[in-house]
Image (cartoon, rainbow, N blue to C red):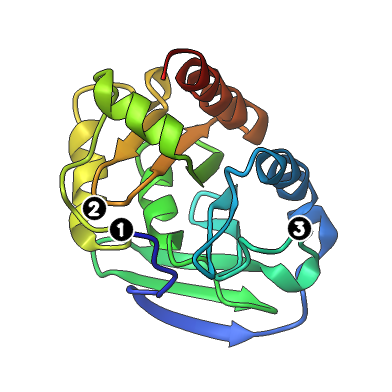
Amino acid sequence: MIDGVIKYNLHFDKSEPLDKSLWQEIQAIRKKLKNLNLIGEKDGIGYGNISQRVSKTSFVITGTATGHLDELDENHYSFVKEYNDREFFLNSTGACKPSSEALTHGSIYNLNDEIRAVIHVHSKDLWSYMLKNDFLTTNDALYGSIRLIDEVQKIYQNINPLDNPIFVMPSHEDGVIAFGKNLDEALESLLLVYKLSLKNG
């Protein structure tokens, strides 16, 4: 199910748009994913989001309900300056609210300090291929829930997350998340499996 409703406890201070230096790398990656329809809109609801770590406890993420837009600008990014995935709380600023998946991104950053980028996309081909081929999989936890955060931590508790930086979410229809030490690395991990899904799906 695709759902753009923010479920975590959000404190949002609307402010001036973010400086371009904070989001221009995200925009370049998003354009590639948008062209592949891995970010977009279905049944009137936008899907897909990208974030990039700024510091140990902060990151920039695409804004909520922006998946349908061909191009984003400074008005479509949010700066997450504080978050706590145990208390299900997030504090952000910028011209728009952060993606409904923002706290899930935060929980992935908590896995390893070297993780600097997270990409969440939707693809029926990719999703089905990963479910059929024993990729890392969360359980039936719903997107944006604390159960999903717990599941992410569980599937990586015995492995280095950067050795297997992609997983599929059965209860989040078509939803897949990839991450890496930078945006290019996260994109590479995602597209490698995406191409396999198109070839062998």
| Between discs 2 and 1, the one toward the N terminus | 1
| Between discs 3 and 2, the one toward the N terminus | 3
Q: Residues within 10 Å of mark 2 (few under 14, many from 20)?
A: many
Name above or below for residue 77 compared with residue 116: below
Give the distance between the C-alpha atoms of the residues marked 2 and 1, in whole angstroms: 6 Å
Give the secondary structure at mark 3: loop
Q: Nearer the viewer, mark 2 or mark 1?
A: 1
Q: Residue at x 34, y 31 (%)?
A: 128
**Foreground pick, 110 / 61:** 61
| Between discs 3 and 1, the one toward the N terminus | 3
Q: Is residue 39 visible?
A: yes
Q: Residue at x 39, y 17 (%)?
A: 163
As shown in the figure, which amino acid type bears the numbered disc 1?
Tyr
Query: Which quarter of the rendering shows the N terminus?
Result: bottom left
Q: Nearer the viewer, mark 3 or mark 2?
A: 3
Looking at the rendering, which quadrant does residue 131 occupy?
Answer: top left
Q: Position of residue 75 (x, y in %)?
A: 75, 74
As shown in the figure, which amino acid type bears the numbered disc 2?
Leu
Q: Looking at the image, do the residues carrying marks 2 and 1 touch, with CB atoms under 8 Å apart?
A: yes
The residue tagged 3 is 70
Q: Position of residue 166 (x, y in %)?
A: 40, 29
Q: Residue at x 33, y 36 (%)?
A: 168
**Foreground pick, 113 / 20:** 20
Q: For residue 143, which numbered disc appears in the image?
A: 1
Looking at the rendering, which quadrant does residue 186 occupy?
Answer: top right
The residue tagged 2 is 148
Looking at the rendering, which quadrant does residue 195 occupy?
Answer: top right
Q: Looking at the image, do the residues carrying marks 3 and 2 touch, with CB atoms under 8 Å apart?
A: no
**Foreground pick, 65 / 7:** 65
Q: Residue at x 28, y 69 (%)?
A: 88
Q: Residues within 10 Å of mark 3 (few under 14, many from 20)?
A: few
